[in-house]
Amino acid sequence: MSTQDFDVVIIGLGPAGGTLANLLAMNNLSILVLEKEASIYNLPRAVHFDDEVMRVFNTIGITKSLTKKLIINKGTKFVDEKGNLLLDWPRPKVISENGWYPSYRFHQPDLERSLRHKLKKFEKVIISQNSEVYKTISHKNYSIIQYKNLKTKQFFSVKSKYIIGCDGANSFLRKQIKCEMEHLGFEQRWAVIDLILKTKKINLPDRTIQYCNSKRPATYCRNVGKRRRWEIALKEDESVEKFFDSKTLWKFLSQWVSQDEAKIERKTVYTFQSAIAKKWRRGRQFLVGDAAHLTPPFMGQGMCAGIRDASNLAWKISICCKKGHNDRLLDTYQSERSSNVRDYINTAMKMGELLNSIGGSKVSDTVYMEKDGSIKMNSIKPKLGKGLGDLNDKNRGKIFPYLKINFNKEFDDLFSCYPILITNKKVSENKLKIRTYSTIDIPEIETILKKFNSNSLIIRPDRFVLASTDKNDLKDFSRFYLNQIFAL
Ligand SMILES: Cc1cc2nc3c(=O)[nH]c(=O)nc-3n(C[C@H](O)[C@H](O)[C@H](O)COP(=O)(O)OP(=O)(O)OC[C@H]3O[C@@H](n4cnc5c(N)ncnc54)[C@H](O)[C@@H]3O)c2cc1C
């Protein structure tokens, strides 16, 4: 056994763990990432992410390599058994407030490779593969993590200020720290079949199609390159072996594609579930990503939620490592994130009902009827739950828009680690104890302040507005909110 100290130990190097490790490393923390598998899982689960998530990837600095391997997603259509359009969820090719297109299709191993490649550049990050965590012990000011190298059979013990479980749906840490799941109701077995086209198949849709059908709901996904996916609900007690029998499967797929036109890359079964952990934190141990919540994938939001968790938690943990532990700040992680992810899960469950042709309620409040009678849906944008800031502040929790400033620099780069204040007032920064940018330094801020109808804003590193004010006394304003973060 060896003992070494870290700021943070992360369990699990999936997309949530990889993103979190990068964000923490940008804050110059020492990090150990323990992953039980020997290498990247080479087949995709997630195939879609959105603009908010792409902005996090941009903060990390992987969008250059990633964009070459992405396609812009055009949206999703829900159709009935006769092919009639029930609901259209378009994702227009327009740059959003996050500075990217609303929706992308990707190949998960490409993303995981980019995240790992970036991590290798940080001297204070150690990635240990073949390393399975089997025990954590919590103390008041630190935790102990015990793990086994599955290859050498050696045992190790390390000490860390914080432990973060990004260890997926069957999270070891969730069980270890005794955090129960609240089950929200949806549970259904689905076959997932990934195909690679052999020819330039002409007749396949270029959007996601949700085939709503009480007997056999199915989803078609137009993935990157020659990859296409079908997700198909299995009947209760239906034999997987029988369904996956080559003849049966190709007969089903022949509605879209023949065996001459495509080869099966993999076929597998998942039980799609909806659940949220009742507690996301015990002392210095946290849950992130699938470890904290599970959603049916009908919105393509499971991994996205994990990336949002990472973005919310990373800067809070970093501040605690540098400026001292702050329970109140860390408590806001679950309170801000859980209601947001719950909205996504509830909407995905409603989509599941539509797919299964059960239940008559609207998928979301963002569903509306066009003049021509067609039913459309806008993407939902759930706000942050209660936490930092004042709920009476109309700007609190809104996304701060992505902004290019002079010489094509990105304004985001100025507040990836600490909150900042932006204002149209003349101020002396050292009096405020927060890095401040005024419209004199950066004229582009003016339009943003107008958009928020406010003279001054405090912005968080995860790109949300913490607080806004029209008052002249910025000293009291900034001190009040900095106190929430740094426990001054
Ligand atoms: C069919 C399907 C389609 C999906 N489509 C989408 C989509 O389009 N968009 C989207 O956003 N989401 C989608 N999802 C959800 C998405 O795949 C998951 O939310 C995401 O992969 C979870 O990431 P994670 O990093 O939290 O966990 P995981 O990817 O599960 O990673 C957990 C890691 O922890 C490691 N680990 C576990 N226990 C230990 C231990 N004790 N010690 C060390 N390491 C450990 C595991 O080996 C693993 O590498 C889909 C899911 C499915 C099943």
Image (spheres, rainbow, N blue to C red):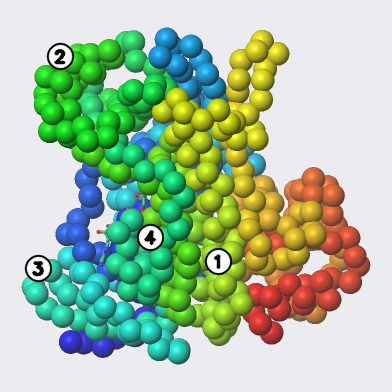
Give the mark nearer the N terminus: 4 vs 3: 3
Q: Marks 4 and 1, Cα distance to the nearest angstrom?
A: 14 Å
Give the mark nearer the N terminus: 2 vs 4: 2
Q: Which mark is residue 151?
A: 3
Vertical order, 90 against 158 (above or below): above
Q: Secondary structure at mark 2?
A: loop
The mark lying in front, picked from 4 and 3, is 4
Q: Could you tell me residue 147's position as x and y percent? A: 22, 76
Q: Quadrant of residue 326?
A: bottom right
Q: Amino acid at mark 1?
A: Tyr
Vertical order, 56 against 458 (above or below): above
Q: Could you tell me residue 376's position as x and y percent? A: 60, 23
Q: Quadrant of residue 191?
A: top left
Q: Could you tell me residue 244's position as x and y percent? A: 15, 29
Q: Marks 1 and 3, Cα distance to the nearest angstrom?
A: 35 Å
Q: Where is mark 1, residue-wise? A: 333
Does mark 4's beta carbon lie closer than 8 Å to ligand 1?
yes
Q: Is 286 positioned to the left or the right of 419 in the image?
A: left
Give the mark nearer the N terminus: 1 vs 3: 3
Q: Where is mark 4, residue-wise? A: 291
Q: Where is mark 2, residue-wise? A: 260
Give the mark nearer the N terminus: 4 vs 1: 4
Q: Secondary structure at mark 3?
A: loop
Q: Amino acid at mark 2?
A: Asp
